[in-house]
Image (cartoon, helix red, strand yellow):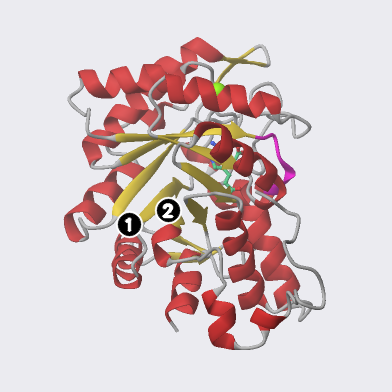
Amino acid sequence: MNKKPLARFPALRLRRPRQTDWSRRLYEENNLSANDLIWAVILKDGKNVREPIAAMPGVHRLSPDEAVKAAIQARELGIPALALFPYTDADGRTEHGEEATNPDNLMCRAARIIKKEVPEVGLMADVALDPYTDHGHDGLMRDGEILNDETVEILIKQSVVQAQAGFDVIAPSDMMDGRVAAIRSGLDTAGFSHVQIMAYAAKYASAFYGPYREAIGSAGVLQGDKRTYQMNPANSDEAMREVALDLAEGADSVMVKPGLPYLDIVRRVKDEFGAPTFAFQVSGEYAMIKAAAQNGWIDGERAMLESLLAFKRAGADGIITYFAADAARAIHK
Ligand SMILES: NCc1[nH]cc(CCC(=O)O)c1CC(=O)O
Ligand SMILES: [Mg+2]
């Protein structure tokens, strides 16, 4: 891009096109549409459950029947897909997270009923063990170490039961090495070559996941931190290597997570790979905007839309966000 202006002030006046609404719209370079949104939804067992999450005002844990209603809303609002995450209480958790591979677990039951009632909406499954382990880690733990290859074997089974339940997109968020290739071949062998993989490729060890850990019941149980598998926030070149590897292993799309603090990574990924690139506007980002809005310190709706548009400007093809329904409603009005 040639940044040197061809003309100079006063012939060139960059304020000129900003004077009217029609002209501002015409000069707009980027645009946010409902098509760009993946709605992050937290599940909880039961019926007619809509349980508020304290750290995420406006977000509720939904039982599968309520999640169906959310999917119907998504369809009406033009939101292409839902991403599901399960809450598990301390009693439902085990050392090895066996519930992850139970074909009748909360995620699978929700997927079956949503796919039956609202087949037009895409369904994305989070793959990792942290909702199911009593230590809150994404993988198996032995003597304080998170085991890579042993974990990957379980993730393959978890992905296959999710595909069997009807999930359209398998999204491994665990950051084990080699899991994309292993899951791809596991899905293909089980007859699910049409099921997509969206890899959480560049996922950072971030403070912005705090509210999510409350939301899924990991907050009280997590031992230590996730820095031996999630990325160091100081690194950017390493994110390119993570993305290159996941694409080479067969990921259909890649994700950067968290979102706003990592827009430089989103832009680099898009520019260097030209692959379908998604960003996750995580729980802490949602909470920050909500908290400031609740205090009257910012205009919540404008901040929401501005933050989502920023992802598009950075090159993201879509955004996983807890704001999806609110944003789609705001866009349509
Ligand atoms: N597999 C873990 C997982 N999957 C999605 C999120 C975060 C989502 C959010 O903060 O909104 C996390 C958090 C973590 O790594 O502890
Ligand atoms: Mg990786």
Residue occupying image coordinates x 27% and y 35%: 195
Snapshot quadrant of residue 276:
top left
Q: Nearer the viewer, residue 321 or 132?
A: 321
Is residue 126 shown above or below 134?
below
Q: Secondary structure at mark 1?
A: helix
Q: Which region is colored magenta?
A: 204-208
Q: Residue at x 61, y 88 (%)?
A: 20
List the residue tagged with mark 1: 64
Is residue 12 visible in the rendered image? The answer is yes
The quadrant the C terminus occupies is: bottom left
In this rendering, the answer to whether 173 lies above or below 45 is above
Indicate whether 292 appears above or below 38. Answer: below
Name the disc covering residue 23, or none: none
Q: Nearer the viewer, residue 120 or 54?
A: 120
| Residue annotated with mark 2 | 43
**Mark 1, residues whose alpha carbon is within 10 Å: few (<14), some, or many (≥20)?**
many
Taking the image as drawn, is residue 45 in sight?
no
**Amino acid at pointer 2:** Leu
Picture coordinates of residue 262, whole percent (x, y): 68, 44
* Residue 87 in picture, x, y percent from top left: 48, 48
